[in-house]
């Protein structure tokens, strides 16, 4: 492989043909990270169909077949954009999703022809849904149940557990159902910390304000002592805290403009702070139940 594929931080992509074999024009080498469809026009209908400039066609453009790694690379770039829009992780995390979900075509593991395998966007999104959001849903539900049982009052435990699970993992299975695309489905299927990208614009879910314990702290102070809202606040704080800690450990959350180690430290510290807010609210709820107060 030659420059620029050899540059640090660049994902080298080889091309496959219609039969999932190496395209005859594609170079290869140990630097290849992924392979993707690049087309093979020696096969009838085997090229990559795309809208391109054509001075001789009405409107100045036409759909034509092409082949090349210039067709393969945009497939990977587009897939990375889809994954990036579905998470708030680092570029390394996005790459790990794509390589971990790729269809292995050559010898088991990484090889110089296909890299980690041929790009599989559907598998990559299922990996995000099940192995990130699904895992967060389960972990948060269990940890919240453990905290509510240990520190909290008897009343409201189910609300604590359900809120924590939904805040951390969202209604993660929604994208797997045959539902028409909508903003509501997109919002509800996301963890709470990723709502900002939908409501405010791309990038907000990687801001210092969103990825912090600010909201749990404010709600704990204002609504935590109340019988009506206390369990919800405890669950939300627990869900946010677990997501922040999980993000710090896995790279699935990353702050803009902060290097990796500083970002991880910020996430972990704020995650434990949010967890402390949850425990504080649960303890106040238990004290209220024992004393018979009605705040």
Image: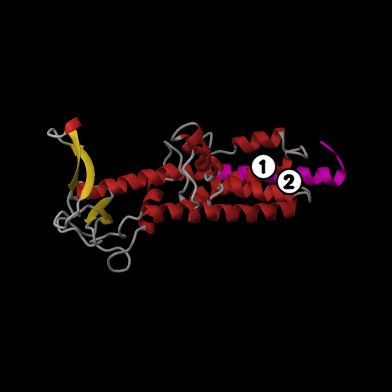
Q: Is residue 35 visible?
A: yes
Q: Quick check: 276 above or below 111? A: above
Left or right of 127 on screen, residue 10: left
Counting from the top left corner in percent of width and height, residue 52 is at: 20, 38
Counting from the top left corner in percent of width and height, residue 85 is at: 42, 42
Secondary structure character of the magenta stretch overall: helix
Q: Where's the N terminus, which quadrant?
A: bottom left
Tell which of 119 and 8 is nearer to you. 119
Residue at horizontal 77 percent and vertical 42 percent from the top = 284
Left or right of 156 on screen, residue 79: left
Residue at horizontal 64 percent and vertical 56 percent from the top = 142
**Magenta span of residues:** 269-295
The span from disc 2 to disc 1 (Cα, nearest Å) is: 9 Å
Mark 2 or mark 1, earlier in chain: 1
Q: Residue furthest front?
A: 58
Magenta span has 272? yes
Q: Which residue is mark 2?
A: 282
Q: Secondary structure at mark 2?
A: helix
């Amino acid at each position: 492989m030659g420059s620029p594929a050899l540059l640090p931080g660049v994902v080298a992509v080889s091309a496959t043909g219609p039969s999932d074999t190496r395209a005859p024009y594609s170079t290869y080498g140990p630097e290849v990270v992924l392979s993707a469809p690049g087309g093979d026009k020696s096969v009838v209908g085997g090229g990559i169909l795309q809208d391109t400039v054509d001075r001789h066609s009405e409107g100045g453009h036409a759909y034509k077949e092409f082949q090349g790694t210039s067709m393969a690379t945009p497939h990977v770039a587009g897939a990375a954009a889809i994954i990036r829009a579905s998470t708030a992780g680092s570029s390394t995390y996005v790459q790990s999703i794509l390589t971990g979900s790729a269809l292995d075509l050559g010898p088991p593991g990484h090889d110089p022809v296909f890299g980690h395998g041929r790009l599989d966007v559907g598998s990559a999104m299922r990996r995000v849904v099940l192995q990130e959001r699904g895992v967060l849903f389960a972990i948060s539900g269990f940890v919240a149940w453990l905290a509510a049982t240990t520190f909290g009052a008897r009343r409201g435990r189910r609300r604590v557990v359900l809120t924590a699970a939904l805040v951390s993992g969202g209604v993660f299975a929604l994208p797997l159902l045959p539902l028409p695309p909508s903003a509501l489905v997109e919002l509800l299927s996301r963890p709470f910390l990723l709502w900002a990208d939908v409501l405010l614009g791309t990038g907000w879910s990687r801001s210092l304000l969103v990825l912090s314990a600010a909201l749990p702290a404010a709600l704990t102070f204002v609504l935590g002592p109340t019988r009506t809202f206390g369990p919800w606040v405890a669950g939300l704080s627990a869900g946010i805290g677990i997501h922040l800690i999980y993000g710090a450990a896995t790279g699935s959350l990353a702050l803009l403009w902060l290097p990796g180690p500083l970002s991880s430290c910020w996430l972990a510290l704020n995650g434990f702070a949010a967890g402390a807010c949850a425990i504080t609210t649960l303890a106040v709820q238990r004290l209220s139940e024992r004393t018979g107060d009605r705040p």
